[in-house]
Each structure stands twice: as structure tokens, then as C-alpha cells.
Amino acid sequence: MDFALLGWPPDAPTLRLDYRRFAYAGKFVLESTGKAVVREGERGENEYDDHLLAAASFDTDRTDPDRLVVRYVTVRDDRQGEGLGARLLAFVAAHAADRGYDRVRIAVNNPAAYVAAHRAGFAFTGAETGVAELVCERPAVRPAAVDADAYRAGLDRYRDRDLDDESLTRLDEKAAAGPPSVVEAPDDAEPGG
């Protein structure tokens, strides 16, 4: 398994992710966003990039040229829960620093993505954007400072959503556990672009 940066905006390659196995698969066919991936093996013989385990797309913030915005992160359905999304986010942040960005931002719309962002060194800013997405940010060169109260405040925002009892129980468990440990960017990563 390796991590690779495939290109920076506006001229990054497109990816053909299997829409049955990846959320947001259609967002990765755009050339205007940078791409980074986790991959294993070689591309197969079907129409999809089936050797990919996870993918991220990103571009420069429209209002702040010193900030990179991660637009989408997706992990193949059979590899979710392995920490690939968090490690890929940390990888993108490390390369953003190399590229001269000061900060990296992501907006997340569910508790699992929120925890993954924190594992990648992001912190909740207190802001929301889009369709009930919580804004998380970090300096590009290092993880954000860990603030347990801010972390729990972000989790509490999800309580106002239409969650079933099982989801609320998982939310309580995440809040009780406190902020997760921050992962390192993968060492075996291949820079590119």
C-alpha cells in the first residue's frame, strides 16, 4: 500500500472511482482539483481505478490563496475503519506545507469524518458551512493544538441532527473518549505534481 500525490489544481488527473464502492465518486472526475490517493497493486482490467483504496481532492481556497481546502475524502467501502482517511488527510497537509500553503481546511458532515479529521491534526473552528458541515482546520506544517472542549463542542453539533439511538450512543462514546490521537503523515509516501 502506498500514498501518492497525483497532481495539483488546476491540472490534476481524473479518477474513475466505482460509485458502488466510494462515496462522492463523481467528484473525482474533475480535472480542476488536486488529487491524492492510497493505492494497492496495479490498475485492474475494468473501467474503474480499482487499485485505489482512498482518495482526496483539494484546491486553493477561493478567498485565501494561502489556504488549501480539502473538498472530498472517500475510502472504499471494504476498507473503512482502518484509518486510511485520516492518514491520507495528514499526507495532503504535509504536501500542502511543501507547496507553500499556511493552513489546510476541511468541512465534514458526519461524526466519523469529524473524528478522522481530528486524527489527521485538524481542529474544529466553531464554524459551520454548506449543508451542516463542521469546519475543521490545521496549520499545514504541524497538527493543530488539541482542545478537548472544542472537540466535544463539535460532536455536540451532531446531536441536533436526526440521529437514531445507535448513532447517539456512538456519539456519546466518542465524546467520552475525548480527542483521538493524531496520526503521522505516511513516510513511504510518493510526492508528485
Image (tube, rainbow, N blue to C red):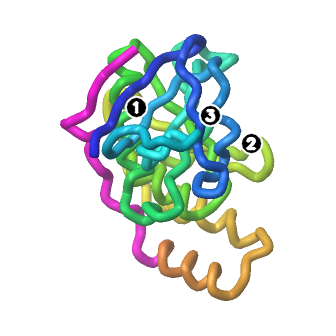
For the point 47% across and 64% down, which residue is it?
Answer: 78
Q: Between residues 193 and 131, which one lies in front from this camera angle?
A: 193
First along the sequence among labels 2 and 1: 1
Name the residue that disc number 1 marks: 93
The amino acid on which the numbered mark 1 sits, given as a three-letter code, is Ala
Q: Locate residue 178, reporting x and y percent.
A: 41, 69
Between residues 93 and 147, which one lies in front from this camera angle?
93
Q: Nearer the viewer, mark 3 or mark 1?
A: 3
Q: Magenta part of the protein: which range?
A: 176-193
Q: Which residue is mark 3?
A: 28
Three-letter amino acid code at the position of disc 3: Phe
Left or right of residue 160, residue 100 in this image: left
- Report the side of 141 relative to 163 (left or right): left
Pointer 3 or 1: first along the chain = 3
Indicate which disc residue 191 carries: none
Residue depth check, mark 2 versus mark 1: number of the one nearer the observer: 1
The circle drawn on residue 129 is 2
Seen at 58% across and 56% down, the residue is 21
Q: Residue at x 64, y 60 (%)?
A: 110
Separation of marks 3 and 1 at Cα, in angstroms: 19 Å
Tell me where residue 5 appears, x and y as whole percent: 39, 26
Front-most of residues 106 and 191: 191
Q: CA distance from mark 2 to mark 1?
A: 21 Å
Query: Are discs 3 and 1 less than 8 Å apart at CB?
Result: no
Task: Answer whether residue 166 is magenta in the image.
Answer: no
Q: Position of residue 187 (x, y in %)?
A: 19, 37
Mark 2 → mark 3, Cα distance in angstroms:
21 Å
Give the crowd class for mark 2: few <14, some 14-19, many >=20 residues within 10 Å.
few
Looking at the image, do the residues carrying marks 2 and 1 touch, with CB atoms under 8 Å apart? no
Going by the numbered disc 2, the residue's amino acid type is: Thr
